[in-house]
Image (cartoon, grey):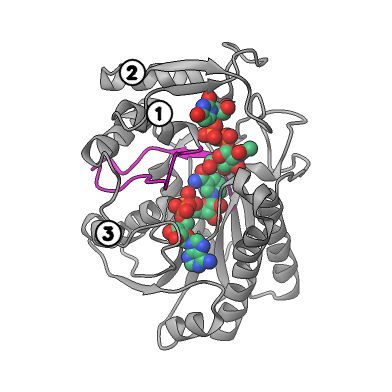
Amino acid sequence: MILVTGGLGYLGSHTCVALQRAGLSLLVVDNLANSRIAVLERMRALGGGEVEFVQADVRDRAALDAAMRGRRIEAVMHFAGLKAVGESVARPLEYYDNNLTGTLVLLQAMAAAGVHALVFSSSATVYGEPAFLPYTEEHPLNPVSPYAVTKRGVERLLEDLAAADARFRYAALRYFNPIGAHPSGRIGEDPRGIPGNLFPYLTQVAVGRLDQLTVHGREYDTPDGTGVRDYIHVMDLADGHLAALRHLLEARGSITANLGTGRGTSVLELIAAFERVTGLRVPHAFGPRRDGDIASYYADARLAERALGWRASRGIEDMCRDAWAWQSANPSGYPD
Ligand code: NAD
Ligand code: UD1
């Protein structure tokens, strides 16, 4: 059985479907801070496997001990945490507590229960301003926001723990920009409030919840002047987790790897792809640059391919089609 923290969230729920499809049984721990319970039945139906659920906070050691007791947990996938960069600047205590304390308590509970394998949700934001592109895993690390510092801090903790305990192994996966949804449209990204990220904002404009998209900046040093990112289909990201889990369960050692496609797409290219796939128009206007934004970044994705045998197979149009399947069928997101 695999313990999945934060398994009802955007990335966790899609990964839980892929894990079930691979025949794994799951124990999901989530405090519902940023997710809805309606996800659970949908991911069970899509995955067709066994999913137990415990509503708990990963900082609650007693709750983790109780959840693991009597169950044979082979490995943990740790998605639980807070993820908004801007909010982390405004509320650092909450970010350090959830992301650092949460992981620390989880690792202590794992050690006590004799569980020695962890897949961790890290982020490309650990690299900071690019010294060169694409970012390889050897690129200098310069986390800037409190959020980024928590991600790098956990990576460092995992390195120290693996050095101290030969039984412990981890995969720290540095995600680029996951978008899209399960192709069924039954599960997808459902941010609370006004979305801060480009793609959920775009799909909410397309469905009529928001009036128009603002393109932040049009004079970057990029081919069309708008920001370039490495968007990765959420189901490719889910498959990457399965590959990382196999790597750990086969005792092939610890790894820190990018999960991206290796390709950059600009804001205007993404809007155009979405319009092409859906036949809709996405009203948009240009605004000033957003504070803290980087012009362009994308992954060198070769390490994951070499070491994990995984590589992203879905393209931008798949991401647009599947996100629209979700947003059009669930214009207001999940029911309460
Ligand atoms: P999400 O907010 O949709 O999912 C996180 C889940 O964890 C939610 O269901 C939330 O209720 C739960 N949670 C939060 N704090 C918790 C706690 N203390 N105890 C128990 N449950 C808790 O976010 P997501 O997009 O699915 O991201 C998952 C992970 O991936 C996060 O760690 C995030 O930092 C990381 N990540 C995400 C992205 C991205 O673009 N979405 C990029 C890089 C890294
Ligand atoms: C942000 C986070 C990153 C996190 C990722 C996914 C920062 C600095 N980084 O990345 O850590 O992993 O989200 O959660 O915040 N854009 C618009 N209009 C909008 C929104 C965005 O033009 O309304 C542009 C941005 O300027 C950028 C691109 O779209 O060029 C992508 O933005 P976004 O989706 O917010 O992701 P990142 O900033 O790359």
Dot 3 beta carbon under 8 Å from ligand 1 = no
| Residue 207 as seen in the image, left or right of residue 224 | left
- Residue 328 screen position, x and y as percent: 24, 34
Is 222 inside the magenta-drawn segment?
no
SS for dot 3: helix
Please report whichever mark, 3 or 1, sits nearer to the chain's N-terminal start.
3
Please report whichever mark, 1 or 2, sits nearer to the chain's N-terminal start.
1
The one nearer the camera, 289 or 76, is 289
Amino acid carrying label 3: it is Ala
Is 195 inside the magenta-drawn segment?
yes
Ligand 2 shown in quarter: top right
Q: Which residue is mark 1?
A: 202
In three-dimensional space, the C-alpha distance between marks 3 and 1, rounded to whole angstroms, equals: 24 Å
| Residue 62 as seen in the image, left or right of residue 278 | right
| Residue 253 as seen in the image, left or right of residue 211 | right
Please report whichever mark, 3 or 2, sits nearer to the chain's N-terminal start.
3
Dot 1 beta carbon under 8 Å from ligand 2 = yes
Q: Residues within 10 Å of mark 1 (few under 14, many from 20)?
A: many
- Depth check, mark 3 against mark 2: the one in front is 3
The answer to whether marks 3 and 1 mark residues whose Cβ atoms lie closer than 8 Å is no
Q: Which residues are magenta?
A: 173-196
Amino acid carrying label 1: it is Leu
